[in-house]
Amino acid sequence: MKRAPLWRALAACAVIVISVIISFTNSPRLGLDLRGGTQLVFETKDSPKVKADAAATDRAINVLRQRADALGVVDPTLVRSGERRIIVELPGVLDPRQAAEVIGRTAQLSFHAVLGTAEEGDKSAVRDESGAPLKIGPAVITGDGVTDAVERSDPQRGPGWWVSIDFRDGEAWAKLTGEAACQAYGDPRRRVAILLDNEVISSPSVDPSIACGVGITGGGTEITGSFTHEEARDLAVLIKGGALPVPLDLVEQRTVGPTLGEAAIKASAEAAVTGLLLTAVFIVAVYRLSGLLSTIALLCYGLISYAALVAMGATFTLPGLAGFVLAIGMAIDANVLVFERAREEYQQAPKRGLRAALLRGFKNAWSAIADSNITTLIAAGLLFWLASGPVKGFGVTLGVGVIASLVSAMVITRVLTEAVMNRAGPRISGLGSPGAVRTWLNRRNPQVMRGRRLWLAIAGVLAAAAVAGLAVQGLNFGVEFTGGRLVEFGTSKPISAEAAGQAVARAGFPSAVVQTGDDGVTVRAARLGLEETARIEQELKKTDAGEVTKRREEFIGPSLGEELRRNALIALGVAVAMQLAYLAFRFRWTFGAAAVTALVVDVVLVVGMFAWLGKQIDGVFLAAMLTIVGYSVNDKVVVFDRVRELWAARPKEPFAAAVNGAILQTLPRTVNTGLGALFILVALMVFGGDSLRDFAIALVAGIVAGTLSSGFVAGPVAILLSRFDRKPPPAPPAPKPKRERQGTGAVV
């Protein structure tokens, strides 16, 4: 064996062995949308004394972590995002009201002397537990002076709970209570007001047994009241955790029940297995032995992708799983490019043999493979940097999948096919015949570009219809882009949309958007709070829906919704601009402009279709659109790469002939790659939930539009723009000079 194939085989074995070790020694990290729990995103705000910078946000994270630990949350995650954002993940916590109240409360604790009863209308007064106004003095002790706080109960003292507090400076507490003890019993001035975030949580009167001027010694006290165990525990957590250095605003909240996460994992696994089987059957039927070997490489691709994600510590989210499943279909693209090119090489020079044709297929397909994968990586990078929440996971998964597919196709598939190709005949290999699609095209040789003006007119009409959908219907933006709260309830019995709408209206939200399905109800409204959500759940339980459970909940603040909407537009704009710049750099400006024109048509058609259908535009749709951008440009790169090659080989022929030939020669690859991706997407549509189903619908429409626009929009536009291109046709690649052998090659 020569050195290059040997090293390639060793590298492939090393990658596979390392991937197996990582996969079996590390557990995947599941996101909250798969294992259940609550995610809170807080934004720090400036206070009169402290600026909300990165340092203040880090101090706030330390306080929040103490509170999460004190609540008993297993494996909480708290990270800073930017300078002012804090992402808190609380696995297993399904009550967002409790989580937001305890985790994010400012918790400014203070102890004050009561100066007497205040008059009604006094703005400086505070109200005690019964609502009576009190006039209080300045804070004597703040939360910094507390060393510990614990909830306690004692059956011998009767039912109920209280909070025991230990002070850092016991003398200050003794002085405060000693001065209050000098007042007559029943006098308001004998009380001590304990405030949390400027609200009185307790205002006990000093016991008659306490001597005037002496006070309560020992450095501790108790806060009593009609506390339940949970209320006493939450109060102790807030006091012990200390005050936040800056105020926090809750800008995003997601809650997912564990049953929904289990169903999502099961659905994604079923879609992956079904899609992989369908793709394997298809690729083996088309390419026979070569297809079988590429299927083995495809399994290795899945292993490598999974191991890479686990080793990176990436969080697996529901969109991330969709990206993992989708990348299976995209991973076959490089194999199809190589095999189709090898078929062409074998038809041109069958006497050289299958192995020589395969090697030339790998060599000549590399340019198109590299260009198309770079464009997809651009889309994945934009998703990671500009998207929010679980959609980031899709960007990571897609990017890792692209790199793993390159390793799978260019290393593993090559090692396997080179090892067995000389032992297989042309018929068994699957590379000896041009294939049914190419045979038909070679026999008919249709002149597609003769009707280029007609194709552009049809594309213009379809784009106008899509724009009309935007004008007439508008876009149905989801909570992620508009702000508000979305709650999904599961029901054991089907409920009509009318009955569900009436229940939501009785809860106080007659204008809320209510959608029903076979086993659930989804409610979306702008000013839907946590208390109102609980009220809606109670009203739904009064209907004939049977057992009602909350499956998931999402809250997006209005400022964050506006930011996400702006980022979505920026992501699409930057994606188009970067694709244009890259194509102009790799080819010429006319090719780049033609590809981007077709790309804009693809995007407009998919967005217009969603507008006419009234489907929701959310972060998952953004992921689909950026994937469509990558896939569409990927297809056009393959076409223009062949245009450049044919134009260089026959520079005296009309440019339209080169475009027509490139479209016909790359059509078999386009059809086979598109079908491979469609198998995966159909599996996602069948097994996925509502959000993944819309994701798959968008991608199916985008793949069909992107495939057709490569030949019927990008090609004609490139021909029209060629008259403005002053650059000469590309020169054919110069043949490499043959190296003369030095000596006989014999070794003694």
Image: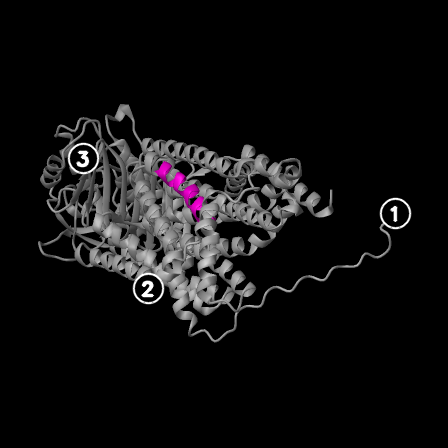
Can residue 683 be found in the magenta stretch? Answer: yes
Question: Which of the two discs, 3 and 1, sits closer to the camera?
Answer: 1
- Provide the residue designation for mark 1: 747
Which residue is depicted at the point 33% across and 41% down? 692
Q: Where residue 482 appears, x then y in whole percent?
A: 24, 53
> How far apart in space, not on screen, are marks 3 and 1 (Cα)?
85 Å
Residue sitting at the far right: 748
**Pointer 2 local density, CA inside 10 Å: few below 14, some 14–19, many at least 20:** some
Secondary structure under badge 2? helix
Q: Where residue 354 appears, x then y in whole percent?
A: 63, 43
Which residue is depicted at the point 24% across and 47% down? 615
- Location of residue 680 (image quadrant): top left
Q: Amino acid at mark 1?
A: Val
Viewer-closest of 463 and 319: 463
Viewer-closest of 263 and 371: 371
> How far apart in space, not on screen, are marks 2 and 1 (Cα)?
67 Å
Tell me whether the residue at label 3 lies in contact with that at label 2, contact meaning CB atoms closer than 8 angstroms. no
Tell me whether the residue at label 3 lies in contact with that at label 1, contact meaning CB atoms closer than 8 angstroms. no
- Location of residue 465 (image quadrant): bottom left
Name the mark on residue 537: 3
Q: Amino acid at mark 2?
A: Arg
**Pointer 3 local density, CA inside 10 Å: few below 14, some 14–19, many at least 20:** some
Secondary structure under badge 3? helix
Q: Does 258 sit above or below residue 200? A: above
Instruction: State which tag comes first along the sequence, 2 or 1.
Output: 2
Residue 394 lies left or right of residue 341; in this view the side is: left
Q: Where residue 344 appears, x then y in whole percent?
A: 55, 49
Question: Which of the two discs, 2 and 1, sits closer to the camera?
Answer: 2
- Provide the residue designation for mark 2: 453
Q: Main secondary structure of the magenta part?
A: helix
Residue 434 lies left or right of residue 512; in this view the side is: right
